[in-house]
Amino acid sequence: MTIYLDNAATSWPKPEAVYHAVDRFMREVGATPGRGGHRREEEAQHIADEARDALAHLFHAPDPQGVAFAMNATQAINMALKGLLRPGDHVVTSSIEHNGVWRPLKALERQGVEITAVPCAPDGTLDPSSVEAALRPETRLVTLIHGSNVLGTILPVGEVGQICRDHGVLFLVDAAQTAGAYPIDMEAMQIELLAFAGHKGTYGPHGTGGLVVRPGVELETWVEGGSGVESASERMPEALPGRLEAGTQNAAGIAGLLAGVRFGLEQGGERIRAHEMELTALLIEELRTVPGLTILGPDDLARRTAVVSVTVEGYMPDQLATV
């Protein structure tokens, strides 16, 4: 029996409905959403619209048209960071961000954006008051990972979201590790921008993800091209989602993503999460019996995801990964 332990990178195996949706789209639909007005294109557009509706429902987003598809969470994060930040702006983040956030921020720093990385505790936990203390008059954005891809720590995005709202600062959340598996309410958590991966907790295929944008948040385009609407204009459309969706989208992947999101909603997030944490508790219990092994992240399971990382005395992490 094979046990797959790489769900933090990509969930697998997928629900059967996902395989079926991708296969059906490729064989029976095949068209590109928003390109033309024939029957197959209309069906492709209908699938894309239903996917936006399902994702808006999952994240409690106010407007499905604010769901812009991307290849992955990293691309979605780049949409947000490069669409918002300009020289002289200040951004606050944490010390445990994924490179999907950190590398774009460092690139923007070279262009004149200032960064404050608020330190987390050794187990990855973050005191929301430290984020508030880092805010400045020129702070444009706070960006936080929701669940650490290394430590498994869940950051207090709800508390930080309220702090951002109180200070008039935009809030971007990287939900690559939590979307679909943990409750996310953009309204209650005061989140303006949510980046998600489609191929992890929402069970979609590779090459899917997106950025959810609250109404009123204006983003400059970071890539331009065909959009299927306003084609006579030399500029990208002003309205979402077309403003952020340059070029042909992964329509078959979006069909699979829709099936994955529906599967998760039907199963129920609480049920999925309870199963994940039952397995996580069992894994941690057994790992604690291994001599020389240290488990990273919070001891309290309520403060972590199902991501578990360890170190072993005498081994480098890359050596241990090949065992």
Image: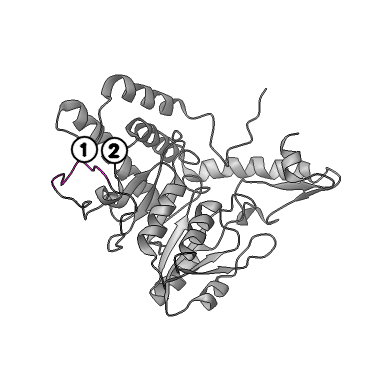
In the rendered view of the protein, which quadrant contains the C terminus?
A: top right
Please provide percent x and percent y for residue 108: 46, 62
At 56% from the left and 60% from the top, the residue drawn is 155
Q: Is residue 266 left or right of residue 99?
A: left
Q: Which mark is residue 34?
A: 1
> Which quarter of the figure has residue 116?
bottom right
Q: Secondary structure at mark 1?
A: loop
Q: Is residue 245 left or right of residue 147?
A: left
Q: Which residue is mark 2?
A: 48
Q: Amino acid at mark 2?
A: Ala
CB contact under 8 Å: marks 1 and 2 = yes
Sequence-first tag of 1 and 2:
1
Neighbour class for label 2 at 10 Å: few (<14), some, many (≥20)? many
Please provide percent x and percent y for residue 156: 54, 63
Of helix, strand and loop, which mostly describes the magenta segment? loop
Q: Is residue 52 left or right of residue 237?
A: right
In the rendered view of the protein, which quadrant contains the N terminus?
A: top right
At 16% from the left and 27% from the top, the residue drawn is 39
Q: Is residue 314 left or right of residue 34?
A: right
Does the rendering let one see residue 154?
A: yes
| Rendered position, 179 above or below 145 | above
Quick check: is 182 in the magenta stretch? Answer: no
Please provide percent x and percent y for residue 138: 42, 77
Q: Amino acid at mark 1?
A: Gly
What stretch of residues is rendered in magenta?
225-232
